[in-house]
Every structure is written in structure tokens, then in C-alpha cells.
Image: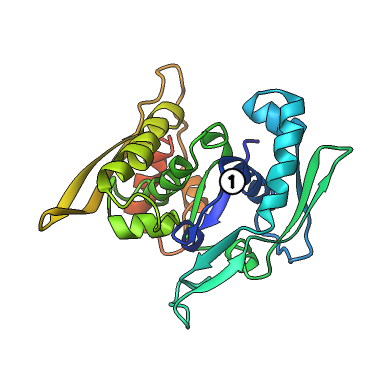
Amino acid sequence: MELQVVKSNHIINASYRLSVLEQRIILTCMSKVPRHEVITDQTLYSISAAELVEMTGGDIKTAYRDLKVASKRLFDRSVTLYKEPDGSQRHPSKMLTRWCQSVNYIDAEGRVELRFGTDIIPYINMLSEQFTRYALSAVINMSNSYAIRIYEHFAQWRGTKQEITITVDELKSVLQIEDKYPLFADLKRWVIEKAIQEINEATDLKASYTTRKTGRKVSHIIFKFREKPKPKSEKTKTLTKAQAEKLARPGESYTQLYARLKAEGYRVRIKT
């Protein structure tokens, strides 16, 4: 079964910065969280250099070295949360916390073991609404950390809309690059265009963007994205109405359900 990342939308919209390898560690461990099982801050997850090589390719010795370095940095990585797990506004307005409460690198095995932080657990446990699901394989081979974050924002709205507008300041805050790229031309060159290029080359989405100005200054970025056409040889799975209803999210109408299922590769005309 293909590993799936299930992530609270409030983490996707949170402010943090992780390297590509750090994101691979976090996302792979998230994909190993059993659905419908309550985990605690004592639950241990692990990923090995051999697993990474199997998923992404590369040299095993390099994977051992890079995983060890990334595991040491990961413990110090923080995330700023703006919403409670239920979506309500946090008071005070934001909380700075850690991704992990413990990270252990087992040198002889080339393996990282981690426990998610206590404050992160509610955003992982028993997600029933306001969450995003996507295949780990969609991002595991990406080499641009900003591309992974922007892809997640697209995945958050997959099946409901194909355009999102974000201010330049909001994008920089989400990516934690407020102190970088004061000129929009640099942000465009080093962040936006590189991310869009990798999303288009490496994922199941096709994306583009335009900008909007306030006065003479670029203030908003309008991202457009859509599913890439599936290969003709790939069969489309047809669901019965009962099967479709089992995939419905809380509060999701039939129209929203069918639109999302179509985006995920299922036949829209549900059999009765």
C-alpha cells in the first residue's frame, strides 16, 4: 500500500523552515502514523538510510552521513502555530513549539528514531476534518524545500478549487524567510520560479502563477494549479455510491465529494 501523508491544514499553514532531508524525515514518519489510532508523545517512529535510498535513490554511505547530520538539526527545528487543532484562533495569537521532543540517531543501524512534540500530537491524532492527504511519493524525490511547502498548499485545495491567492508577506512568513529576499525579483527567481518548476517536473500537478500590485509594489501572488492528465493506459476506478460515501469527509456535500474523487482519479459517474 502506498504511504500517505495526512497533515492538519493548520500545520500546512503554519510558519516553519525545514531542509529537504528534514522534511523527508518528518513526512515519512507522519506517513507511518496509523489512521484511527491515538498516538502519544511517547510513540516512537523511525526512518533508516536504507529506506531513504530505496525511495529516493543515491548512495547508502552518503545517506548515512546526511541522515545523521539532519537528525541533529531536526531537534532544534521549531514551528509557529496560529490555530488550535480544531481550527479556532489560538490565544495568544501564536505558539512557538518543536516538531520533536526527542531525536535519536542509531549510528550502527543508520536509523533515526523520533517522538513528535507534545504540542504537535493533536495536529496528527485522529484527524477528521481540516486535513490534507497526499501520497508520500509525490514529494519524496523533490529537492527544493520551498517546492514541497507550496505543493502542500495546492494539495490542501485539490478538488475544491484551482487557484489560491497569497500575499507576498504571507508567503514569506509561511516559509520563514521574512529576513530574506527584500526585492521581489529575488523572491521570484530563487523561491517561486524554482518551486513551480520542480512541482511541474516532479509531481502530479501543473502549476503557474501571476502577480498583483498594490500601488507600484507586487503585493499578491496568484497560484493556479491543476491535475496533470493521467496516462491513457492508467485505468480509472469506478466506485459504487456506498464506496464513495465511505471516502467522504465530515461535512462534505455530494458535489464536493464527487469533485474531489474526480481530482483523485476516480470516475465521477458513481454507480448506484
Residue 113 vs residue 217, the one in the foreground: 217
Q: Look at the picture and state if 206 lies above or below 125.
A: above
Amino acid type at circle 1 is Gln
* Residue occupying the point 36% across, 29% down: 228
Element assignment for label 1? helix
Which quadrant does the N terminus fall into?
top right
- Classify the position of the C terminus by image quarter: top left
Q: Which corner quadrant of the image does residue 115 belong to? A: bottom right
Nearer-the-camera pick, 119 or 35: 119
Mark 1, Cα crowd under 10 Å, few <14 / some 14-19 / many 20+, is: some
Name the residue beneath numbered marker 1: 23
| Viewer-closest of 258 and 163 | 163
Is residue 47 left or right of 227 when viewed as pictured? right
Q: Is residue 206 above or below residue 260?
A: above
Q: Position of residue 263 (x, y in %)?
A: 38, 39
* Residue 9, above or below 139: below
Q: Is residue 226 visible?
A: yes
What's the colour scheme? rainbow
Image point (43%, 34%), residue name: 265
Q: Position of residue 178 (x, y in %)?
A: 39, 58
In this image, 186 relative to 3: left or right?
left
Q: Residue at x 39, y 52 (%)?
A: 180
